[in-house]
Amino acid sequence: MAAPRRRILTRKQLAHYRRHCQEAIGDDFIICLECGSTFRSLVAHLWSMHGMSTDDYREKWGYKRLTALMDLETRLKATQGFRARWATGWRFPVRRKVEDETIRRLFAKDLTVPAIAAKTGLSQLTIYARLFKLRLSRRRVPNEELLRLARRGLWVSQIAARTGLVTGTIYSRLARLRKGGARIPPPRGPRPRGDVRAVEAERFLALVRKGLTPDAMAARLGIRPASVKHRLWVLRKRGLVLPSTLRLGSQSIVSDARLLAPCRKGIGPAEIATRIGLPYSTVVGRVHSLRQRGLLPSPPPRPGLSRERVSDSELLKLVRAGFGTRLIADRTGLGMTTVKSRLNALPQRAESDHR
């Protein structure tokens, strides 16, 4: 199953999804209302990054108790697989009750999670959840050590390099310590730049004088394009004159004429981004700018987003046929909020028809 394309949500979009939680579950994605990231399923993400159970997440954001925290395609495939296994005689396994001391004892023997699952009869996901609940980790770093490093003014990335912990784990542990009343001063000194300092200045300037693009320089140096652009920005601030063929932003590397040619052929932004090598969001912004300047005609309105595409009579037929709000939204292409508002505005709708 292919992973969904990562979506970048603004604060306004995330606030909208938090108010309308049902719209956060799409056909091929589900949005985490805690951080705004998109996934196929939220179960493992909630345990590993937010320390929440699915029941706590549903209660916090207003989901029903039986709402599946996965996208519709994954839920459909899981349902089909379950029915196929049930037809072959598979039945639910008997849930075993394993004490916390048993898990502590097996964990102390340096057994892996699959080995603990095999000995206890629990699933690996359950073992991970129990280990998180018991605060057990292979990299045992006490809170006193974290506090000592944080009070020395180190950044989280520097603490991660010294302790071997993941930065997300350090952030969550420091947040819990602050809630417990521990005083942690802000880090001192400049923020570490990561891989930027790993490249010598002479080698970097030699590639700059050749007029290579940031992406080409990043490929040769083995660092991120964002790091290359930041270092170019620093050099420009210091007075270095960059070659005329080099620009800091990737938007100015590709000319408007090169973007206009595929757009006039009807090629979508995703395919243009693949052909030219620009980010998807950059292509969308450039195409919008071309339309504002009159170089491209305005696109026709999308029928899936029009409220007038579906008449009230068609909505009434679907309601009287016994379709729920989500099925009506899937059939008509309207949003969940739009369907609910349209159904509430229908004068001839019975109260129990769309529940």
Image (spheres, rainbow, N blue to C red):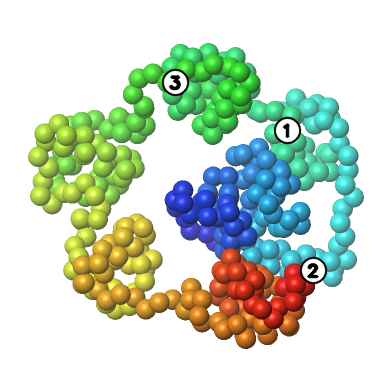
From the viewer's perspective, tell me whether residue 314 is left or right of residue 291.
Answer: right
The amino acid marked with disc number 3 is Pro
The amino acid marked with disc number 1 is Lys
From the viewer's perspective, tell me whether residue 169 is left or right of residue 97.
Answer: left
Question: Circle 2 sits on which residue?
Answer: 83
Q: Residues within 10 Å of mark 3 (few under 14, many from 20)?
A: few
Viewer-nearest of labels 3 and 2? 3
Q: Secondary structure at mark 3?
A: loop
The amino acid marked with disc number 2 is Arg
Q: Residue at x 86, y 62 (%)?
A: 90
Q: Residue at x 51, y 18 (%)?
A: 184
Q: CA distance from mark 3 to mark 2?
A: 54 Å
Which of pointers 2 and 1 lies earlier in the amino acid sequence? 2
Q: Position of residue 50 (x, y in %)?
A: 62, 39
Q: Secondary structure at mark 2?
A: helix
Q: Position of residue 306 (x, y in %)?
A: 48, 76
Question: Circle 1 sits on which residue?
Answer: 133
| Foreground residue among 345 and 211 | 345
Mark identifier at residue 186: 3
- Residue 154, quarter of picture: top left
Which of pointers 3 and 2 lies earlier in the amino acid sequence? 2
Which of pointers 1 and 3 lies earlier in the amino acid sequence? 1
